[in-house]
Image: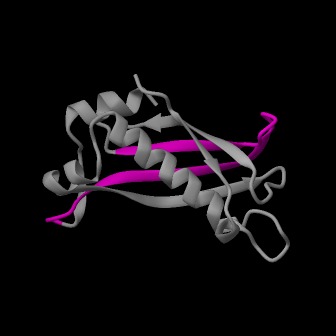
Amino acid sequence: MPDTTATYTTRWADMDPNGHLRHSAYADFAADQRVRFLAAVGYDLATFARLRLGPILFREESRYLKEIRLGETIRVAGRLLTLADDGSRWTIEHTLYKEDGRPAATVTVDGAWLDLEKRKLTVPPAELVTAMRGL
């Protein structure tokens, strides 16, 4: 199973006027980690387009614990909290860690899979469900 973490260095564009990571950047890093994980298990953006399948979010909740500053290297780890038996709905919790290993924030998302042609919720391929269980 591939690594479920990703490492980033914060940029000027990620900062708010107070000099720390802006609230929406936390969600951006979490989303990027999810996309990287899915690509690593064979579900990159081209595969989703071919399958006419896409992830959607119903809820996104952030908890801020420690400041993250400009130029800081952070690590983002994702873990599966819940998964419907058929894989149709899921909850993933992302933890953003500071350089020293302390948790800086959590971003929790509830999502599902959307059939992009029918515009309705759907059950993903069995291989994707298996891969999700590895998160």
Q: Residue at x 77, y 42 (%)?
A: 98
Residue 58, horizontal then vertical, whole percent: 46, 61
Q: How is the image coloured?
A: one colour
Magenta segment, principal secondary structure?
strand
Q: Residue at x 48, y 28 (%)?
A: 3
**Dividing the picture into quarters, in which one does residue 84 lie?**
top left
**Left or right of 18, for residue 125:** left
Q: Residue at x 49, y 44 (%)?
A: 91
**Left or right of 14, for residue 38:** left
Residue 64, horizontal then vertical, whole percent: 78, 54
Give the farthest residue toward the bottom.
17
Residue 114 among those drawn in magenta: yes
Placement of the N terminus among the 4 image quadrants: top left
Front in this rendered view, residue 135 or 114? 135
Q: Residue at x 65, y 70 (%)?
A: 13
Front in this rendered view, residue 49 or 88? 49
**Dividing the picture into quarters, in which one does residue 129 lie?**
top left
Residue 73, horizontal then vertical, whole percent: 71, 46
Q: Residue 103, relative to residue 59: is it above or below? A: above
Residue 62 among those drawn in magenta: no
Mark count: 0
Q: Residue 71, relative to residue 103: is it above or below? A: below
Residue 40, horizontal then vertical, whole percent: 36, 36
- The magenta segment: 89-118
